[in-house]
């Protein structure tokens, strides 16, 4: 695996090293030793998937508050998405900043998002699916989020008119949020 740092400490892009032959390809998507070398979570007791029927679907920006903060390793298994991480850690020099990457089944790229960062994505193709490896079980009582269009963050989403659910539409701005 190839680990690439982003402008936010702890948020990494992870590219698969595919071994190809006449049958197709094979690659690792997780290696405990390699993740430990980068100081990343090495246990993922929960895995989840998100299927999104329509292009333009936007989910997020979601995170879990302390003491149930979660790290996530996310990859797109079908379709293509614009995937975003926002730093919400109070002591971080990049608090309020965001980074994004295009994840697709074709490119095999993954994004690692540490505790204290919110996550969201917008689908760029119909029938897009994401697979999440998560460092802690989901805790509904600690589930939080910030609004996708928060002007203090200023994410440049690729599609102007997103498809949102009511929960995400009603999330607070960062100034109203506590990690």
Image (cartoon, rainbow, N blue to C red):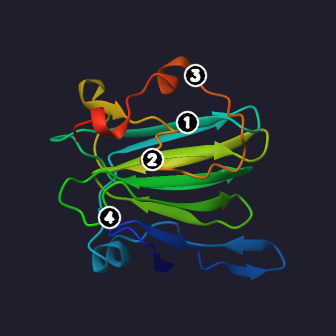
Dot label at residue 119 = 2
Residue 29 vs residue 24: left or right? left
| Distance in Å between CA atoms under marks 4 and 3 | 28 Å
* Nearer to the camera, 151 or 171: 151
In this picture, residue 15 sits left or right of residue 41: right
- Give percent across and percent down for residue 175: 30, 38
Q: Relative to the observer, which residue lies in front, 147 or 35?
A: 147
Residue 59: mark in rendering: 1
SS of the residue at dot 2?
A: strand
Of helix, strand and loop, which one carries label 4? loop
User: Depth-wise, is mark 1 or mark 4 nearer the camera?
Assistant: 4
At horizontal 57% and vertical 45% (from top left) the residue drawn is: 121
Dot 2 or dot 1, earlier in sequence: 1
Q: In the picture provided, is 97 more to the left or to the right than 39?
A: right
Q: Check contact, mark 3 vs mark 1: CB within 8 A.
A: no
Examine the rendered structure and indicate whether residue 170 appears above or below residue 71.
above
Q: Are marks 2 and 1 in contact (CB under 8 Å)?
A: no
First of labels 4, 2 by sequence position: 4
Q: Which residue is mark 4?
A: 94
Gap between marks 2 and 1, in whole Å? 8 Å
Q: Nearer the viewer, residue 126 or 106?
A: 126
Task: First in sequence, mark 4 or 3: give its number.
Answer: 4
Residue 162 drawn above or below residue 15: above
Disc 4 and disc 3 in contact, CB within 8 angstroms = no
Q: Are marks 4 and 2 in contact (CB under 8 Å)?
A: no
């Amino acid at each position: 695996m190839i680990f690439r740092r982003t402008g936010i400490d702890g948020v990494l892009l992870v590219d698969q090293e595919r071994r190809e032959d006449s049958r197709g390809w094979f690659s690792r998507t997780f290696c405990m030793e390699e993740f430990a070398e980068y100081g990343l979570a090495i246990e993922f007791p929960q895995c989840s998937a998100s299927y999104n029927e329509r292009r333009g679907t936007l989910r997020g920006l979601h995170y879990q508050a302390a003491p149930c903060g979660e790290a996530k390793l996310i990859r797109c298994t079908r379709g293509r998405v614009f995937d975003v991480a926002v730093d919400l850690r109070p002591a971080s020099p990049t608090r309020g900043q965001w980074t994004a990457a295009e994840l697709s089944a074709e490119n095999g790229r993954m994004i690692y998002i540490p505790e204290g960062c919110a996550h969201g994505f917008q689908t760029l193709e119909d029938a897009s699916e994401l697979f999440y490896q998560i460092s802690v079980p989901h805790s509904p009582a600690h589930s939080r989020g910030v609004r996708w269009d928060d002007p203090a963050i200023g994410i440049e989403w690729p599609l102007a008119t997103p498809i949102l659910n009511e929960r995400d539409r009603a999330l607070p701005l960062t100034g109203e949020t506590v990690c």
